[in-house]
Image (tube, grey):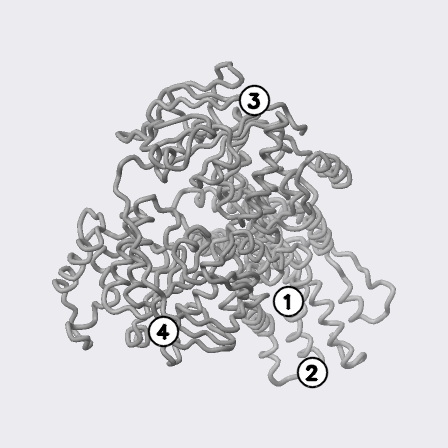
Amino acid sequence: MSVGKAVGVETIGMTMRFGGFTALDGVSVKVSAGSFHALLGENGAGKSTLVKCMMGFYHPTSGDMLVDGREVKIDNPRDASALGLGMVYQHFTLVPSLTGAENLVISREKVPGIIDWRKERGDLAVFMERMPFKLPLDVKVAELAAGEKQKLEIIKQLYLGRSFLVLDEPTSVLTPGEAQEVLGLVRDMTKAGDLTVLMISHKFHEVTAFADDVSVLRKGKLTGTGRVADLNHKAMAAMMIGDQPIAALDSRAAPRPDAEIVLKVKSLKAPDRTGLKSIRIEDLGVRSGEIVGIAGISGNGQKEFLEVLAGQRPRDAGEVLVRGTAYAATRAEARALNVRLIPEEPLKNACAPKMTVAENISFRTFDMDGNGRPVSWISTSAIRAFSARLVEQFKVKTASLSSPIASLSGGNVQRAVLARELTGEVDLLIVSNPCFGLDFSAVAEIRARIMKARNAGAAVLLMSEDLDELLELSDRIFVMSDGALVYETPIAQASVQTIGEHMAGHH
Amino acid sequence: MDATEIGLWGVPLAILGGAIRVSTPFIFVSLGEAITERSGRINLGLEGTLVFGAMTAYAVAVMTNSPWLGLLAAAFAGLCFGLFHGWICKFPKVNDIAIGIALMLFGSGLAFFFGKPFIKPKAPNLPAIPFGGWSDIPQVQAALDVNVLFLIGAVLSVILWWAFRNTRAGLIVRVVGDSSDAARAMGLNPDTVRLLATGVGGALAGIGGAYLSLYYPGSWTERISSGQGLMAVALVIFARWNPLGCLAAALLFGGAGALGPALQSVGVTQGYYLFYAAPYILTLIIMIATSSPTRTLAGAPGELSITK
């Protein structure tokens, strides 16, 4: 239960094969005691496999682990925790309906049959005094903000006496301010020699600001390692992605301030998913040829707003106008007004996973003939021809047109959805988290496509939890917090600091 | 029974008595279901368990002449049903609701098969405590004749409410019910916890069945349960998975169930059949009033297949 002394961990020639596929190929990484080590790599580069081998979730095909210079055998997560090795997952492992205190106590190795809460609370208060984070432990975890949950996850590991922590993309759900704070505090603990940290990340600026050392993985191999101080972003990016071509962003056509307002939202009110609160959008206009970004921490109403625009959620009051016409997201309206939608998690929200690639690509057009008139008999050959053209044009990698779309990789599902949504005339494009979980080249390509649509005159509403993405693409940025748009800035004057403060609701 | 002496006062009195008498099986089944659902599974088979428990209790009581042995046998039979459900559901791609429905039919069918010879004989009843001894009015005495199982059920709901917060077992059940991932990260095996929770839930439902055949109505017939096990499942949702809520909801349902007989006893001759339907109408109204297309149920365990 006490804060231990930092331990150093080293892997030697770690190799992991799943059948014929080598996920990890002879990776040796040395994380010295009391250091803050970053592990960089794209999705599928083997980062998770490496740490899962270290934590005993996987049994590596070959390779050794050293803890404090001594060879150890880790067969399961229990062995790892006995050695003081702990992991903070990207997805929270706290139990939402339990309070912070209940979560901490129940995660302990030995819990008494009947819990004496008076004594436990006393012990927790003493423990929390030595912690750098201050947290309310008596409220349900479900009511904590994402940043607080992340802190509680870290505190839980320290409470369990872990002195080597793996942080798996710890800031992906935090505001820039929260990320700074959490990583800063963790950094202080490593400096004091209480903790060793191995952080999985793909954000270069975090690595530069907080890490001492960095190791980079690509396709299961270690492609570089060194002191962060000796490396710049470019060198790290080269190690990470190798020499694959990256699609370049179109240069931004100059925005026309007098362009037609395509999407207009007035005094919109809708219940959020708990039904206890509501989202309120007072006034939002998106002009033709501009990208309006909406920033915010997840759970602040962006999802509900998108669902209203997509017709998935009823609204209590207010108007949504497209080109001055009331828009209720019916199929006929979307077709007449050229509204297209790219929701987040496209496989779940924009596809029928078990239907074929060809069928999914032709969802918008399968019931029309070449002149836009409804047909009574659907022509499979027309669907196949249409899809074949789009698959070619958008470089969707698929075994065949008749494979189920669920068998495609995340990037290719998103390409297929883009192909469907960006083909034909697009006046209004509504996009949400388009690049979540995709690799470098897919991200660059998808952003380039969105920019191209904007330059072609589409009005684009882009909701994203990735601030870098918004700063790269948007012409104007709104911040959504607690169900309302609380801040607006043109891109030229946008500051990460100010946006972050509004995201956290500090204004 | 002559109800005219105390006139219309007989109605609330009969409802109170009815609430206590009728609610007991609801209390046990809903507490059992609450434990099971808190662990992240739904066992719809409790209706079958209830009927089978009623038959087992009656049969064993007839053969041994001891209602308590009958009660124990019913609990054991319920435990077996629960464990069977829990064991099947651990296999991947098995749907707990479908298995529950199958077990409901299986339990009832098995009870009818084994129960045929026990429809005629008379079994000894479970004892009741006459709390109404201070009064001369027979209706008061009848209403306050409280069965020990009701008292045990009431105490059990308080204990469960306390245990969900203050014991390791209670916290573990809540952890498993709310997040399998978190449970696995803690080194808990969700399947084992759910197996045990379903087993305990089944045992409690079996006890509820024993009450039906050994106290009220107090004999074994094939129509003994008339869907009480299913309504208890609805009741758990209404009670927001809180054991104290289960007790209150069971009393409410029991009272509603007593409305028809009470009105009949004071001489209402028209339309009292409608009031026999009161518990079912109440179930419908509550389910409609507490549901919504746009929000999820507050307090629902995160792993439950109906709320996921």
Q: Amino acid at mark 2?
A: Gly
Q: Provide the residue designation for mark 2.
A: B267
Residue at figure coordinates x 66%, y 58% from the top left: B215
Determine if marks 4 and 2 fall on one subunit.
no
Q: Provide the residue designation for mark 1.
A: B253
Q: Earlier in the sequence, mark 2 or mark 1?
A: 1
Task: Give the mark toward the camera: 4 or 2.
Answer: 4
Chain identifier of the residue bearing label 2 in the image: B
Residue at figure coordinates x 38%, y 34% from the top left: A236
Q: Is residue A416 left or right of residue A230?
A: left
Whole-percent x, y for residue A274 in the image: 55, 62
Position of the N terminus of chain B, as image quadrant, is bottom right
Q: Provide the residue designation for mark 3.
A: A7
Q: In 3D space, how far apart are the residues under numbered discs 4 and 3 (Cα atoms)?
A: 61 Å
Q: Answer few, some or many: residues within 10 Å of disc 1's Cα (few below 14, many 20 plus, some between 14 and 19).
A: many
Q: In 3D space, how far apart are the residues under numbered discs 2 and 3 (Cα atoms)?
A: 83 Å
Q: Provide the residue designation for mark 4.
A: A259
Which element is circle 1 on?
A: helix
From this view, report whether residue B10 is shown above or below residue A154.
below
Chain identifier of the residue bearing label 3 in the image: A
Chain identifier of the residue bearing label 4 in the image: A
From this view, report whether residue A417 is shown above or below residue A246.
below
Which element is circle 3 on?
A: loop
Q: Answer few, some or many: residues within 10 Å of disc 4's Cα (few below 14, many 20 plus, some between 14 and 19).
A: some
Whole-percent x, y for residue B26 in the image: 62, 59
Task: Give the mark toward the camera: 2 or 1.
Answer: 1
Which element is circle 2 on?
A: loop
Q: Amino acid at mark 1?
A: Phe
In the foreground, A420 or A461: A461
In the foreground, B135 or A493: A493
Which picture quadrant has residue B285?
bottom right
Q: In 3D space, how far apart are the residues under numbered discs 4 and 2 (Cα atoms)?
A: 79 Å
